[in-house]
Image: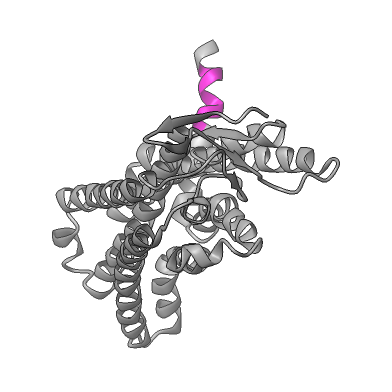
Amino acid sequence: MITKVLEVHNHTVTTHFILLGFPTWPGFQLLLFFVFLATYLLTLLENFLIILATHSDRQLHKPMYFFLSDLSFLEMWYVTVISPKMLVDLLSHEKTISFKGCMTQLYFFVTFVCTEYILLAVMAFDRYVAICNPLRYPVIMTNQLCGALAAGCWCCGLITAAIKIVFIARLRYCDTPLINHYFCDISPLLNVSCEDSSQAELVDFFLALMVIAVPLCVVVASYTTILTTILRIPSAQGCQKVFSTCASHLTVVILFYSTTLFTYARPKLMYTYNSNKVVSVLYTIIVPLLNPIIYCLRNREIKAALKKTIFAEAVAPGKMGL
């Protein structure tokens, strides 16, 4: 393979990276291709159906489902920034990615991860208001506030990613570095840099701490108050009914935070372990696949809306032919 380099100020600067990806055992990459392709397409379909159901059913025009559709929209792009390139590399011998392509992939991936952290915290706050202040819920969670909170999540994600990219992109990468990963993530890029990356690592750690710790505190505080409120309900049936409205969200929070927390708390250390790729598969492929299923299984309104939407789509062509 010809190494493409550019001479700038007497320093050899890379223009390409090589993604090592997954083990190249005979037939293993082909098996992974079909498994990940099916997972990717199913994830897109699940999230698209949730968006379609929440927008077409007027009974779901509530803040909780507005944030859920925003989460589904986010996760469709979240998996798209990783999966297509990964699928191409599984069938290719040359797993190269340009410097600009790598930084672009990293920027959008970090944007979506940071946005999801904050969005999950906003959804926890929504459940807190709905359960602990039910009478004031329509007054507090107005359409204007929901729109502002959703926009704020995206703005925080975009700005955080931009700051991280500024520090990572200006690092010097010599020749064509071999990245022991299947996509451009923070940890492999910090480790393959041929200059001191301590400043970039410090900035990344501080921003990761803010983006993870602050939303996590909001989630913990919200659910602590929710749990206290639920325990005061005298009826066991009423207690179970109230908790069921936030059980799906809590499950999604636990899955997402548990699979990403240790990876991005100390990114450079995590890269030293090959298990990092296994953990990355969990939160880039498996968790986005499970999230819509979790919401559908535990939410009667979503299941009813999905049945109505799917039935309407199936009947529509027949009506057009009459």
Query: What residue occupies the far front of the structure in this picture?
Result: 10
Q: Is residue 303 visible?
A: yes
Query: Vertically, is 101 above or below 190?
Result: above
Q: Is residue 27 left or right of residue 134?
A: right
Given residues 19 and 155, the one toward you in this image is: 19
| Residues shaded magenta | 312-319
Location of residue 172 (image quadrant): top left
Q: Which residue appears at 55% of the width and 34% of the height?
A: 97
Main SS, magenta region, reads helix
Q: Is residue 136 magenta?
A: no
230 to 201, vertically: above or below: below
Extreme residue toward the top, this view: 321
Question: Residue farthest to the right?
Answer: 26
Q: Determine whether, in the image, residue 191 is placed left or right of residue 181.
A: left
**Count the marks: how many?**
0
Residue 265 vs residue 286, the one in the foreground: 265
Asked whether residue 318 is drawn in magenta, I would say yes
Please report the residue visible at 45 percent of the width from the left and 46 percent of the height from the top. Answer: 75
Give residue 115's position: percent from left, percent from top.
Answer: 34, 52
Q: Nearer the viewer, residue 180 or 139?
A: 180
Q: Is residue 153 above or below residue 41?
A: below
How far from the left and from the top, in percent, is residue 47? 49, 43
Q: Nearer the viewer, residue 7 or 186?
A: 7
Q: 177 above or below 319?
A: below
Query: Is 69 placed left or right of 82 in the picture?
Result: left
Q: Position of residue 170 (x, y in %)?
A: 35, 45
Residue 71 visible: no
